[in-house]
Image (spheres, rainbow, N blue to C red):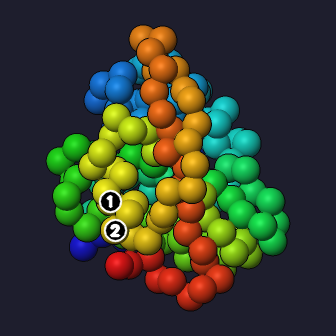
Amino acid sequence: MYSCRPAVPADYPAICSLPQTEEELFFMFPSAAYPLTPEQLDAAVRMRWRPTVVTIDGVIVGFANFYGWEEGRHCHLGNVIVAAEHRGTEAAGCLIRTMIDKARDELNVPRLLLVCHHTNPRAILFYDKLGFAPYGFKRMKNPQGVTIVGILMGMDLASGDDGQK
């Protein structure tokens, strides 16, 4: 059974091992250099809120946090990653539902936002299933310098939506 808890610095090496390719790291953390290091992760986490890991039997299999928190308005879900062997299981659902609850109950925001790259259709469909809806687009460059589309998605937390469709 998956469970979530706050991330601590001792978790950083395990979190850094989750993105297995440059593309996976780009999906998780677009400004990071591959391979992800504990130092890069620590620098990001210091400027973010509620770093959280999802675990099974004590093993870290995913990570997420928030950025862009504007109290009473919104925050952004970021640095989301789930280990390849745990994708398609309940790991991501457990992690994202926990983050939805934290955004609503701990950060007191009525709206949770995220950016999902158009080159990651599996994630787009996953977020849609949880109740996130597209509201705009953002031009981005991938690590090879190619322009891609970041799909801006959001969820109204004030409606009592529990993150399930």
Residue type highlighted by circle 1: Phe
Residue in the image at 68% along x and 59% along y: 75
Mark 1: secondary structure = helix
Residue farthest along the bottom direction in this orientation:
160
91 lies above or below 1: above
Residue farthest along the top direction in this orientation:
144
Task: Give percent across and percent down for residue 133.
Answer: 48, 63
Bin the neighbour count of mark 1 within 10 Å (Cα to Cα): few under 14, some 14-19, many 20 and up. Answer: some
Residue farthest along the front direction in this orientation:
136
Residue in the image at 27% along x and 49% along y: 122
Where on the picture, by quarter, is residue 24?
top left
**Contact (CB < 8 A) between labels 2 and 1?**
yes
Left or right position of 82 against 9: left
Task: Give percent across and percent down for residue 126.
Answer: 32, 59
User: Split into 4 quadrants, where in the image is the N terminus?
Assistant: bottom left
Residue on which the image places disc 2: 129
Mark 2: secondary structure = helix
Q: Can the viewer see residue 134?
A: yes
Where on the picture, by quarter, is residue 157?
bottom right
Q: Can the viewer see residue 106?
A: no
- Residue 63 numbered tag: none
Task: Give percent across and percent down for residue 15.
Answer: 42, 41
Residue on which the image places disc 1: 126
8 lies above or below 38: below
Depth check: give the residue in front, 81 or 157: 157
Left or right position of 85 against 25: left
Bin the neighbour count of mark 2 within 10 Å (Cα to Cα): few under 14, some 14-19, many 20 and up. Answer: some
Residue in the image at 22% along x and 53% along y: 86
The Cα atoms of the two marked residues, 2 and 1, are separated by 5 Å
